[in-house]
Amino acid sequence: MNKKYIPFILIGVLLIMPQVGLSSYVLHILILALMWATAGMAWNLLGGYCGQVSFGHAAFFGMGAYCAGLMAHHFNISPWLGFLVSIPCVAALALVMGFIVLRLRGPYFVLATLAIGELLRIIAENLVDLTQGNLGVLIRRTWVEKDPYYYVILALALGTYFLIQKIMESRWGYYFVAIREDQDAAESLGINTTLYKTIALTISAVITGFTGAFYMNYMGYIDPQIVFSLGDISILTIMVVMVGGVATYFGPWVGAAIMVILAEWIRSLPVIGTGYQTLFGVLLIVIIIFLPNGLVGDFAKIKKLFKKEVPA
């Protein structure tokens, strides 16, 4: 089978999933997997292809979620309009964040993004008149059934996939990879590295904001501890990419499926309970040591492990 047909076969399978009699719980798992695949693809554009490892994507996720929630809470407007409102809000946040942190490199960049994400959480907790603080924002969900939410997040995930594929096959994509491989060499070739890192950050941020806006509409409730969480948002997004495969198109999809299913299974174990993050950390260490390019990136290595030697 020609590999170029694989995405379209997977799209066909995903489109009919709600029509094959799946339970509400299974659809919930699929929705979460698609949501985290979208967030993972967004992070992968900046961290995987452009080489700018961010620990602050919870800031964009939370901003998108609050754009949707506050539209309904304060103005009684459909929270789905939060997708449109989040574009200028999240883009402005990304530009400000880029101006502050994109001149930094290595661990300094990582720590700066982490700090900004935590700063947004503290601000959301204290702007009680606007965000309701730790009480959170509660809205009425649009649909009781899960099928419409499934198709919304599927459309967002597929749109993100094809957008990133188009970007990476364009001139911008070559610039992103050049910056990742050697920023000084890229600058010596005349590439405005600050400009293109800002472009990557802004696109990544807006997509992540869309994911947060969807989360608000789907869950119907948010608070600062949920949507600005370092562990449950920023780190989980990174793990989705690391497990699936950094700088690969399908890596975030595979990583999201594994992480969501694993999280649900671990949480159901009475012995472990909320200690699932510890096991996630162990899993990440194992992946980094034995499969540094993730399951998709090191697929050839995995095939060799299961390939039987044919006797001479």
Image (cartoon, rainbow, N blue to C red):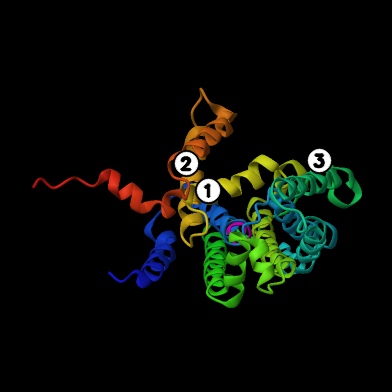
- Mark 3 or 1, closer to the camera: 1
Q: Neighbour class for label 1 at 10 Å: few (<14), some, many (≥20)?
A: many
Decide if residue 280 is on the left or right side of residue 186: left
Tell which circle, 2 or 1, labels the residue nearer the N-terminal end.
Answer: 1
Above or below, 72 against 32 in this view is below
Residues in magenta, as a range: 42-46
Q: CA distance from mark 3 to mark 2?
A: 36 Å
Place of residue 296 in the rendered image (x, y in percent of width and height, measured from the top left)? 42, 54
The image's mark for residue 242 is: 1
Place of residue 186 in the rendered image (x, y in percent of width and height, measured from the top left)? 65, 67
Whether residue 192 is in magenta: the answer is: no
Place of residue 89 in the rendered image (x, y in percent of width and height, measured from the top left)? 80, 64
Mark 1 residue type = Met
Mark 3 residue type = Asn
Above or below, 83 against 290 in this view is below
The reply to whether the C-beta atoms of the residues labelled 2 and 1 are less than 8 Å apart is yes
Tell which circle, 3 or 2, labels the residue nearer the N-terminal end.
Answer: 3
Mark 2 residue type = Ile
Query: What residue is shown with label 3?
Result: 134
- Mark 3 or 2, closer to the camera: 2
Q: At x 40% / y 51%, what residue is drawn? A: 298
